[in-house]
Image: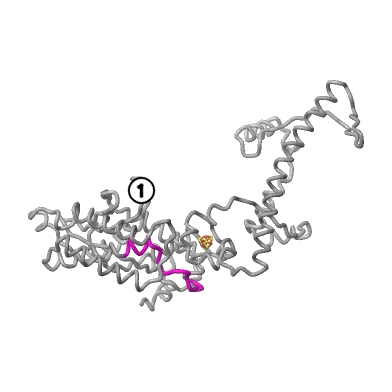
Amino acid sequence: MFMGLSQSLLKYPPPGMHFSYKYKMIYSYSRINTFKNCPFQFKLRYIDKEKPLWEHTAESILGNIVHEVLEKMYYDFKHGKINSLKETLQYFEKIWKKCWSENNIKIIKNYSRAEYKRLAERHLINYIQKFSPLSLSEEEKKRLKILDVEKKVSIALNGFNMIGFIDRLDYENGLYIINDYKTSMTLPSEDDMKKDWQLALYSIAIKKKFSTDKIKLRWYYINFDKVFELKPDFSHAEKMAIEGIQAIEKAEEFEPKPSALCDWCAYQHLCPLRKHLFMPEKKEEVEGEKLVEEYANLKIKEKKIKVMIDEMKEKIINYAEENDLGSVYGKNYIANVKIKEDIEFPSKSSEERTDLIRLLKKMGKWDNVEDLDVYALKSIILNKKWTDNEIERLDKFIKEKKIGCISLRKRENK
Ligand code: SF4
């Protein structure tokens, strides 16, 4: 354990950064990524250390098992033993049974356990046939040196310490190769790979340990038989890691950030955006469900009625115009119709709007039309973009109020 982490952070703050180091945690790529994807999930998991609904999803355990089988395969190769396909699949069988019996695993997609197993087996057979020591020529086997598997690395960046694990570290033709196995079902583009800074971050540790920058990053997308290779961009990885830590250390609010990843989140039962789905069916919950349904139905009716009202309005205006009338009489109501000329200007964020402002300024007329932009002012105050002193001077003009806001969307899965 890195007992000295907070000490070293305090001792060597990076220039221009003033962190409080309030969370005193060891950072990693995945922690920074969790924060980026959803600050609230990050807080529940790493700060509050809440109990998750499940330890693994079927996808994550599948990835772990494939990694473990490949780890053994290369560990044995490093020690002079090349495992046959049969031996590897037997080991896979053993690990599969152990993992599924010992872990609390959540199946989210509509696949059975047997289908996940077939998928994992397919991953492994693909890999073994295409990339494993079994697929190499005698010459290639001699050339390949496995330096380590599941290698833990520590990275010191301007006084910060991070940790990570390299799936496999090879040495071949004068190059250190950081290998990563991917079992995901989507294939990234070359551009996505260039933005990925995880392996580049680990390469900083390898660069330091072996005093070399002759390093290559290699990703195996096993399900697609695809290999990506890139040179590490050390400075990009360093920048991303420091910015990530800085964002976490500076965070005051940890807002939920809903996305497609929510279905995989093991903290949904604690998240205000999802926990209603996990509450026991007490009378109040059924009531809540009924209220939302009724509200949604009324909103749908409101939309339809609004269209009908607009059409009716247009008909009355046309009728009044055609007959030169100021009032149109119904049986019980009178519609007073006023038709006046109006004008419209380009919308706020449009280019034409900028041109219009430029022109008004050029004409020396800007002062006549300039208005207070209350939305901009509100954003400045709520986001504390001015000093406390400046904001305090506006206090007497600010009325605090509570606004409830509802937005409806269709529920995809019940
Ligand atoms: S359910 Fe979604 S928004 Fe809520 S904590 Fe999880 S990831 Fe974040």
Indicate the position of residue 201 as horizontal and vertical percent values: 33, 60
Residue 36 included in the magenta stretch of the image:
no
Indicate the position of residue 230 as horizontal and vertical percent values: 28, 50
Q: Rate crowding at label 1 as few (under 14), some (14 to 19) or many (20 or more) other CA atoms within 10 Å.
A: few
Q: Residue furthest left?
A: 138
Q: Report whether the residue tagged 1 is closer than 8 Å to ligand 1.
A: no
Secondary element at image label 1: loop
Answer above or below: position of 275 versus 122: below
Answer above or below: position of 25 versus 224: below
Res. 108 visible in picture = yes
Classify residue 317 as left or right of residue 178: right
Q: Which residue is mark 1?
A: 188
Q: In this rendered view, identify the residue nearer to me: 85 or 141.
A: 85
Amino acid marked by disc 1: Pro
Classify residue 189 as left or right of residue 23: left
Indicate the position of residue 247 as horizontal and vertical percent values: 49, 61
Indicate the position of residue 52 as horizontal and vertical percent values: 47, 70
Q: In this rendered view, identify the residue nearer to me: 412 or 203.
A: 412
Q: Which residues are magenta?
A: 47-64
Res. 16 visible in picture = no
Q: Quadrant of the C terminus?
A: bottom right
Answer above or below: position of 74 versus 2: above
Q: What colour scheme has been applied to the protein in the rendered image?
A: one colour
Q: Quadrant of the N terminus?
A: bottom left
Classify residue 281 as left or right of residue 123: right
Q: Quadrant of residue 370?
A: top right
Q: In this rendered view, identify the residue nearer to me: 202 or 330.
A: 330
Answer above or below: position of 290 versus 345: below
